[in-house]
Amino acid sequence: MQILMTKAASERVAGRVAAFAPDAEVVAAVSADLYERNGQPIAVEAINPEVVWLSLDSYASGTLGQLFGRLMKTDAPRWTQIMAAGIDNPMFRSIMEKGVRISKSSAQATPIAEYVVAHALSLQVPIEAQAALQKTHEWKNTPYRELGRTRWVLVGFGNIGHEIARRIKPFGVDLTVVRRNPAAEGDLADRVIGLPELAGVLPDADVIVLACALNDETRGMCDEAFFKALKPGAILINIGRGGLVDEEALRAGLDRDQPAHAVLDVFQTEPLAADSWFWDHPKVRTATSAVATNCSWRTCAATWPRSHCSTRPIRARSACRGAPDAHHPEGYP
């Protein structure tokens, strides 16, 4: 069996690969036009991998296109492990249409969940106001609402959604989970509803987290009606896809405090233009997706090929619902 991966990835996992697949032949992509096998150059014609690992460092090293090209040109590939949590990018669709089995990554679930909770806490607890008072040597009260008994709406309950729920439930929050199949198990949730019922829970929500896929059903779901349904003071956190949100409707909602704050990890157009209104809006916190994926790099690198980095394999076209997510041309969540 031949396995194709980056040079850096092969160095990290060489011992583990040798332990569970001693007869495997590991081919490493060193640069755009150089491959190695056992430390020696190998001709491109000799590369016909059954397994391809599109690790995060294939993006960082610039070899992603090279690995993807070999995967698509050869006949043997049966399985590829990707670094992404979502598979809505056209690149992944092409792989599945070739008949190659894909495993998504759940490694980024932990840092993304921590990112969500950190922002929610810092927007509930007046840390910035307290720091300002300290700077001016003022002794004043800074009252705030406790996180306990706040109402959260979590749209999407995959690996990332579960990790978010695991972290917020100990605070005593009331959690409504929105998922495609509301009859499915909703552990950690106080209630599970379908997307058509979302509008009914928005008026009571203190925090709304978007952690769902982008498809025909969810595209533009956060529109003018969505924001007008929010109660003043609500917090919106989007770590799903930029296409979930009508950005002009969000801007109008922020002017009304519906929501009062928006924490945005994704946008319709990335990277953000230097003159984008998001950068300087006082109620918006912006971050790039690299914040989460860079944190999860160490998690994924340390745990591959354990099962939580190789989640449920997904076969062919049925896994892709709706149109591809064009604002992520490189395929990263």
Image: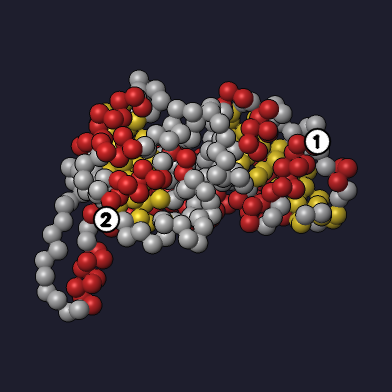
- Say what amino acid the circle numbered 1 marks: Thr
**Which residue ends up furthest to the top in the rendered image?**
183
Q: In the rendered view, does 286 fall on the left or right side of 58?
A: left
Q: Which mark is residue 74?
A: 1
Q: How is the image coloured?
A: secondary structure
Q: Quadrant of the N terminus?
A: top right
Q: Which residue is mark 2?
A: 123
Q: Residue at x 77, y 41 (%)?
A: 70
Q: Residue at x 68, y 27 (%)?
A: 97
- Residue 319 vertical placement versus 294 (above, below): above
Q: Position of residue 213 (x, y in %)?
A: 47, 35
138, 203: nearer the viewer:
203
Q: Mark 2 Cα within 10 Å, few/some/many (few <14, many 20+)?
A: some
User: Percent x, y for residue 283?
Assistant: 31, 56
Side (left or right) of 54 relative to 275 = right
Total labels drawn: 2
Three-letter code, disc 2: Leu
Query: Residue 317, relative to residue 144: is it above or below?
Result: above
For this rendering, which residue is in front, 50 or 95?
95
Name the element at disc 1: loop
Identify the residue at horizontal 54%, vertical 54% (top origin).
271
Query: Cα distance, mark 2 to mark 1?
Result: 51 Å
